[in-house]
Image (cartoon, grey):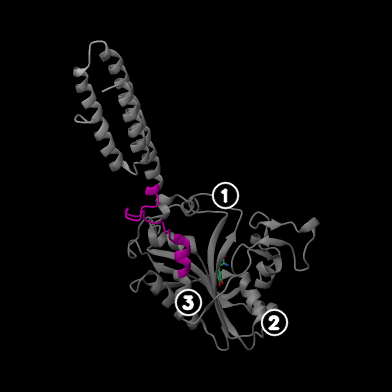
Amino acid sequence: MSVSDISNIAKAAETDINSSADFAGLEFIRVKYLGRQGIVAGLFTDMRNLSQEERPGFGKKLNELKNSLTSLIKEKQASFKKASVIDNAFDPTLPGVAADTGSLHILTQTIEEICEIFAKMGFSVIEGPEVETEYNNFTGLNIPLEHPSRDAFDTFYLKGKNGQQKSDGKLLLRSHTSPVQVRLMKSVKPPVAAVVPGKVYRPDATDASHSFMFHQVEGFLVDENIRFSDLKGVLDLFLHNLFGGEVKTRFRPHFFPFTEPSAEVDVSCIICKGKGCSTCGRKGWLEILGSGMIHPNVFKHVGYDPKKCTGFAFGMGVERIAMLKYGISDIRMFFENDLRFLKQF
Ligand code: DAH
């Protein structure tokens, strides 16, 4: 038993520690050297056999050995811990983290539901640009120059490059999806039946029921001998599909420049079933869409012969429908991107 034995043991222990491959192997080595029955403990016991003079020097070396092995083992443990964190990232046996798949926005879902009902009746689903000409948005739809909706307070007008204007008027952000009627009828001959979902823009101050941008679905059908009863039948079927077979529908005379005759269409209140509540303003009816027989002037603008063809058109606000269907009280919720709201649908 001598000091040189200690340095041999130190070398052997270092080799053992360095070559250990994992926590379990290292623990085995720790117990072998530093355990209660281990080599170091054995050497402390053996000190009894040394002379009084030898003991302090040997004891000091032995303590140094114990401390250096302890810190070597700690270092090695730390290196395993680091590696295991990295390994764990790829551990295929761990339960997986569920992927956040997301879902369609409630407005997209509502648009799809509306369009699907019409698609089943044979309508095509088409889209048009959000930047429109003044002609398509107004003139082609028989909306006269002096109509208040053409005022800059009610429509976002755009300045062309270097203030240039197109021959068919200024450019603007469309204030409704109806201009796609003009676009499609100019490019195809009747019969035609289409629904047009999309964004529209109006310079309204934002509040619980107004937004400068919202969504509409426009629809129209043109052929020979299309009658008001066709309009009623199609919209009746649509509203029953959307709100349930039990709702009643009501066609109220109204005025739109692009249809004649025109009607606003109501459904019996889906909240109070027609009895009268705060949602329907105690009327028992909810206004859902505008509609009518396409005005002969619109046909003239697009090059259709008003003596030969007739047709109907309708337009509805998507936010309003979603708010009624899902009991949403503030239009701003659709656009704030608050996941607590969006995740409910
Ligand atoms: N364009 C109208 C609006 O934005 C909605 C509308 C009403 C469209 C009647 C139509 C219609 O096609 O016939 O308020």
296 over 127 or under it: above or below: below
Dot 2 lies on which element?
Answer: loop
> Residues in magenta?
87-112
Q: Quadrant of the C terminus?
A: bottom left
Position in image of residue 122 (x %, y %) = 49, 82
Residue under numbered circle 3: 118
Between 207 and 33, the residue placed more toward the observer is 33
Amino acid at the residue labelled 2: Gly
Rendering quarter of residue 130: bottom right
Q: Quadrant of the N terminus?
A: top left
Residue under numbered circle 2: 303
Q: Residue at x 33, y 24 (%)?
A: 4
Mark 1: C-beta under 8 Å from nearest atom of ligand 1: no
Rendering quarter of residue 296: bottom right
Check residue 306 in the rendering and tell me which mark sits there, or answer none.
none
Amino acid at the residue labelled 1: Ala
Query: How far apart are the two marked residues, 1 and 2, measured between alpha carbons?
Result: 38 Å
